[in-house]
Image (spheres, helix red, strand yellow):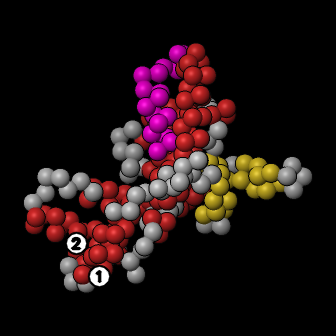
Amino acid sequence: MIPKDWKDITIETYTKLYPTFNTEDMTDTEIVDNKIKQLSIIKGISLEDASNCTVKEAEQIKALLETPLPTKIVKRFKHFGITYQFNIDANDLNGGGYIGIMNAIKDDPVKNMHVSMFHLAKPVKYSVWRSKFVPYEFAPSEVPKRMEEFKQLPISIAYPIAVFFSALSKALTGVTQDYLSQSLEILKKSLKETKEDLVNGDGR
């Protein structure tokens, strides 16, 4: 079945699709081959089987890929039975922690998107006594499994956070750890405005 919405596309699938998005310098033949590759990736079938797909299926894929990715942040979500929450509050910003994440994914941020999403999301449980969701930590032995599960996170959840994270990355470019303490208040204001723009967006 062809997915009709970005929420049906995982980070893992999006990562494979990403190199196929730039068709600017492709010949007509290469564009056709590229569309077959997209069909193969989305349907999880061989290139040979994808080349035999119907025109209707090709049109459905085209319609999906022409749909803008959502930009409205989903702050809390459930994944593999676990409730997670993204910490995007500028007032709680830990500059050193974010710099560490950026350094870890600077070589290939798309390929390692599931890693950054895992580090930016915290598992939470609802506390009746405190009347709110409270974060907790996984056991070290559990972390690799949970991180791998983030490859199956819908891109509709990951992409808006990636946009926010990208804005953070640009804001921190050239900022050293020593200078960070002096510039953090300005950075927090910038990030707060970015978060408000995304949260208040129409998701298109």
Q: Which mark is residue 142?
A: none
Q: Amino acid at mark 1?
A: Lys
Does residue 110 appear in this view? yes
Most foreground residue, 18 or 199: 199
Picture quarter with the N terminus? bottom left
Mark 2 = which residue?
36
Does the magenta-highlighted stretch encompass residue 172?
Answer: yes
In the rendering, at what x and y percent does residue 136 appear? 72, 49
Dominant secondary structure of the residues highlighted in magenta in the image: helix
Most foreground residue, 157 or 66: 66
Mark 1 = which residue?
56
Q: In the rendered view, does 130 fall on the left or right side of 64?
A: right
Q: Quadrant of residue 17?
A: bottom left
Compute the Cα span from label 1 to label 2: 13 Å
Question: Are circles 1 and 2 on residues that touch, CB within 8 Å?
Answer: no
Q: Quadrant of residue 28?
A: bottom left
Which residue reaches farthest right? 129
- Above or below — where is 66 with respect to 178? below
- Above or below — where is 50 with respect to 33? below
The span picked out in magenta is 163-179
Residue count near mark 1 (Cα–Cα under 10 Å), binned few <14, some 14–19, many ≥20: few
Residue, x 48% and y 20% (percent of image)? 176
Where disc 1 sits, the SS reads helix
Residue, x 57% and y 58% (percent of image)? 146
